[in-house]
Image (cartoon, rainbow, N blue to C red):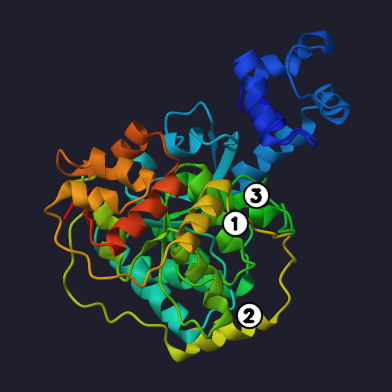
Amino acid sequence: MLVHWIWLAHRPAVNDRLKAALLEHFRDPEAVFFADEAALNPVPGLTPEAREALMDKNLMPSEEILEDCRRKRLGVLTLQDAAYPIRLKNIPDPPLVLYYKGQLPDFDALPVIGVVGTRKASAYGLTVAKRMGYQIGKCGGAVVSGLAYGIDGLAMSGALTAGAMTIGVLGCGADIVYPQSNRALFRDVESYGCILSEFAPGQPAAKWTFPKRNRIISGLSCGVLVVEAPERSGALITARLALEQGRDVFAVPGNIDIPTCAGSNALLRDGAIMVSSGWDVLSEYQALFPDKIHREDGASHQRAYPDEVRSAGLEAEKAPPKVAQNPRIPEEMSDLKKNLEKKSIDKEPWEAYSDVNATLSRLSSEERQVVQTLRGGQRLVDDVIAETGMTTGKLLGILTMLELKGVIRRLPGKQICLK
């Protein structure tokens, strides 16, 4: 029953991975609800606090949440529903329940791109975010973001202008407009897209809710685009989660003298895919969504207007809920960074790729391994990962170096080939 899904989804002291383990063991939340202490014993990772929460069989709070959903016209989507996005279901810690307003899209049939960045964005960043959101929408993509002021809000505004499906994932209940300055954007997304949240109606934003919601943004996406982000940023948390979930990470190059670009520029240094247009992003997925993605060559005049820049600046000066953010580059990205640091980008001219043996002698063993996989012709990046056994981060770093050396070139649809 739906009430049991809500009961399990909101058990205190039971983290998302433990909820997934409980479902795997008992098959459905109703069975978890009726399980006694002895039945819980085989489930690994149960803390005393989690066990106590699972022994609380009071359904009244869950019934009140259901009544709130009816009264506030919120839809409820559970992990077992056919409409639940498969991409999100396949992450290690999917939310058991999603509350939503607006029209629920067929996520898995769409090239969904997460667009994230700093709240304290420069005028350049705001303009680029709006333009990228518009171009992604015009090329057939859907944009998912956090409805925050700054980069998130401008990207969503651009996507709405393009008439694209736009999804806002909140760090509070789906019935709460947050931040209040984005009320008009919230209403537009509700009317022409979808508002999503794993938090119950009425749940206010808190310092821990924003990092938690970031895994949903990346989990719904084929890839995540970071437009502008400082070194300590929630956007970098989303990028890290995207990598851990096997998603692509894109970044827009920023001014090296602006601190709010330091994090996104670091992503580029460590192997993220550099992009300068919405087509650069969506072309990576053209082979997966041939009927959805199309190139829009028309120039986009989308820009952040002075009132949008001023509004974002005023909101950034306010103190939002402090988010415990200490993003770290995942292990595979750290290895990638070390690999890049060992190699000099100032190189002697590279001859045309004609003498394979001479070329191979100049490469590292891992670079040679990648080149060998490409000798038969162009390949999907995912196929090269599978054949070489390398992590995504390591392979991206190697591809960057091979591209700099003039050995390979990238093709649309996440394909690569020898030059």
In the image: residue 252, left or right of residue 381: right
Q: Position of residue 39 (x, y in %)?
A: 77, 9
Quarter holding the C terminus is: bottom left
Q: Earlier in the sequence, mark 3 or mark 1?
A: 3
Give the residue at x 38% y 52%.
398
Which class describes the residues within 10 Å of circle 1: few (<14), some (14-19), or many (20+)? many
Q: CA distance from mark 3 to mark 1?
A: 10 Å
Q: Residue furthest bottom?
A: 306
Pick the front one: 385 or 117: 385
For mark 3, what is the residue? 212
In the image: residue 79, left or right of residue 304: right
Residue type, label 2: Glu
For mark 2, what is the residue? 315
Give the residue at x 65% y 14%.
26
For mark 1, what is the residue? 237
Pick the front one: 273 or 339: 339
Q: Residue furthest left?
A: 354
Helix, strand or loop at label 3? It is: helix
Quarter holding the N terminus is: top right
Q: CA distance from mark 1 to mark 2?
A: 22 Å
In the image: residue 350, left or right of residue 329: left
Residue type, label 1: Ile
Badges 3 and 1: C-beta atoms under 8 Å apart? no
Determine which quarter of the picture holds residue 166: bottom left
Q: Position of residue 270 (x, y in %)?
A: 48, 60
Look at discs 3 and 2 and give the one toward the viewer. Answer: 3
Helix, strand or loop at label 1? It is: helix
Residue 31's place in the image compared with 69, above or below, is above
Numbered disc total? 3
Q: Position of residue 91 (x, y in %)?
A: 52, 36
Q: Earlier in the sequence, mark 3 or mark 2?
A: 3
Residue type, label 3: Lys
